[in-house]
């Protein structure tokens, strides 16, 4: 009888051991699947971040170039119309994100909140930097290039008042500054 009991206990212990080993294998499998799911989720989480960086940089660069150079000078109405349309599109996106967040229809809420914040900063920064670049650096250059240019000027024969609209004056060869008259 003791032999039967010990065999029975050995069989129960073996079953318990097998059951625990099966559970451990299942947990390892679930752990591996869980890690795979986590890795896939992380890969999916990187895509919106990359899109956010690319779109914000593209918006900033587009606005900066649009405002900083020749377009600002030549096509001012078209420039501000384009800026208005971009701002309106951004506002509509903000409004739709707000309404979808409010009524619970937006799934990945934090990415859209980050998009709104980063695109707003890129829009404002592009406007500010482009405008500053134009007025500080490009407008003085354009003003200078718009002025008249005179070549082969002889200061002994011509008066200075006739060159008041000059941006650039090239004097005749051999002309020097009269140091004696400057005292």
Image: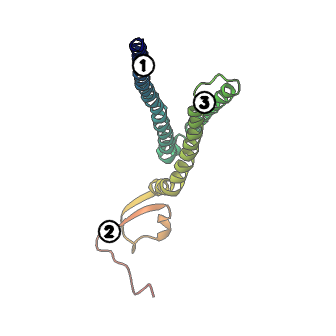
Name the residue: 40% across, 14% down: 11
Residue plotted at (46% across, 62% down): 166
Residue 82 in the figure: left or right of residue 155: right
Foreground: disc 1 or disc 2: 1
Q: Which residue is mark 1?
A: 13
Q: Residue at x 44, y 84 (%)?
A: 182
In-front residue for pair 34/78: 34
Earlier residue among tags 2 and 3: 3
Give how far across and how far down residue 129 sits, in percent. 53, 50
Mark 1 lies on a secondary structure that is helix
Q: Are marks 2 and 3 in contact (CB under 8 Å)?
A: no
Which residue is identified by label 3?
A: 109
CA gap between label 2 and label 3 equals: 71 Å
Q: Label 2, on which residue?
A: 172
Mark 1–mark 3 CB contact (< 8 Å): no
Q: Split into 4 quadrants, where in the image is the N terminus?
A: top left
**Residue 33 percent across, percent down from the top left:** 42, 23
Task: Give the total of numbered labels.
Answer: 3
Q: Does 173 sit above or below residue 39?
A: below
**Mark 1 → mark 2, Cα distance in angstroms:** 112 Å
* Image spot of residue 159 (x, y percent): 46, 71
Judge from the rendering whether residue 89 lies leftward or rightward of residue 158; answer left or right.
right
Left or right: residue 98 versus residue 110 is right
């Amino acid at each position: 009888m003791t032999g039967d009991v010990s065999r029975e206990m050995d069989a129960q212990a073996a079953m318990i051991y097998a059951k625990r080993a099966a559970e451990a294998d299942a947990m390892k499998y679930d752990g591996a699947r869980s890690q795979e799911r986590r890795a896939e989720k992380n890969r999916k989480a990187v895509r919106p971040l990359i899109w956010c960086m690319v779109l914000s940089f593209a918006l900033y660069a587009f606005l900066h170039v649009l405002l900083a150079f020749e377009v600002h000078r030549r096509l001012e109405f078209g420039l501000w119309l384009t800026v208005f349309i971009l701002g309106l599109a951004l506002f509509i996106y903000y409004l739709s994100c707000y309404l979808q967040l409010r009524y619970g229809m937006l799934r990945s809420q934090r990415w859209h909140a980050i998009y709104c914040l980063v695109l707003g900063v890129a829009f404002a920064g592009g406007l500010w930097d482009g405008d500053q670049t134009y007025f500080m650096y490009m407008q003085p250059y354009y003003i200078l290039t718009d002025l008249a240019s005179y070549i082969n000027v002889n200061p002994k024969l011509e008066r200075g008042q006739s060159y008041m609209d000059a941006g650039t004056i090239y004097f005749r060869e051999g002309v020097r500054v009269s140091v004696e008259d400057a005292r």
